Amino acid sequence: MAFSNLEDRLDVAQYESYLSVMCDLKDPFKTAFSYALDMACVLDTNQLRGEYALFGGYGVLTHIVDRFGEKIIPIWRGSNDVDMLGTMKALTALKSFYPFKSDLPSPNLENKRTLIIAGETGDYKLDFCVTSSEDLAARENKSIWGVPVSVISPIRLIGNKILLAKDESKQKEDVLQLLGILEYHGMEVPDFVKDLSSDKRISLYDLLMGVSPEGNRVNIGASEDYFKSLKVYLRKLISR
């Protein structure tokens, strides 16, 4: 399957690196990831970079690649779906470029739509949450093989995933890896925890008590010192 918007954006060196990494990926991860990058190219070309932001698994991967480079991609957990926040402008642009075979509203979330692309290797899902430009003000600009990618902040990603991490191993792994991103960017524990709700603080504390920094399948999480500081700070808040 050709992803012309993506491949036309890459220079020779980037294209060689892209092919090298992609040959190690299996579907559906390989194709879903290619769709995520191709969509980023479409939106950037149409001057809509500020009108969307990746979240979910590919939001996490974008932050990981920003820290470690593209060679980390083959050892990441993979994801079958693309999750995106965006304005109606962004959604309209994507619908004009891709052959979505369905576009259905979510039965649970008012502003969420699930769009399905019929790909050569199967169906691929884009979960698109319609939002305002103001809600995207805190998004971050990253780059994968020189492709501009808009993504929500690691703090917001963690906030989205903490309550799910109790029952889902992939969500737990994402949270642990995002803590490493926060530490890498110099985020102090109090600055990160202060905006979490009480139930999220408790869930994060319970998660940390059940793992060690060395327990990640991909050892790219926070350091032992950061783990300890976070657990101590959370325990003090929870016991008040």
Image (cartoon, rainbow, N blue to C red):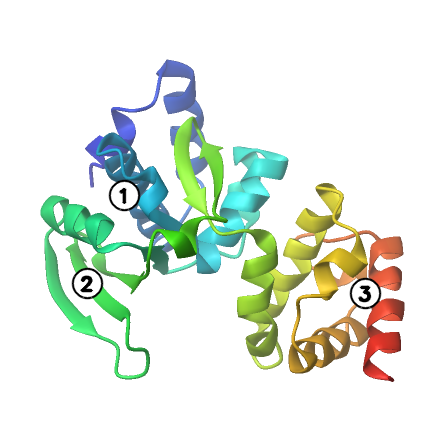
Q: Which dot marks residue 39? A: 1
Q: Which three-letter amino acid code belongs to the residue tagged 1?
A: Met
Quadrant for the C terminus in the image? bottom right
Toward the front, the furthest residue is 134
Vertical side of 161 occupied by 117: above or below? above
First in sequence: mark 3 vs mark 1: 1
Q: Earlier in the sequence, mark 2 or mark 1?
A: 1
What residue appears at the point 44 percent right and 30 percent down from the top-left corner?
A: 20
| Label 2 sits on residue | 116
Front-lying residue, 122 or 212: 212
Measured along the vertical axis of the image, is residue 57 above or below residue 151? below
Name the amino acid type tagged 2.
Ile
Image x and y of residue 218, in percent: 66, 53
- Mark 2 or mark 3, which has the lower sequence index? 2
Residue type pointed to by label 3: Ser
Q: Which residue is mark 3?
A: 212
Q: Are the residues tagged 2 and 3 within 8 Å (C-beta)?
A: no
Distance from label 3 to label 1 (Cα)?
Answer: 36 Å
Res. 174 in view: yes
Please state which of the two labelled residues, at mark 2 or mark 1, is closer to the viewer.
1
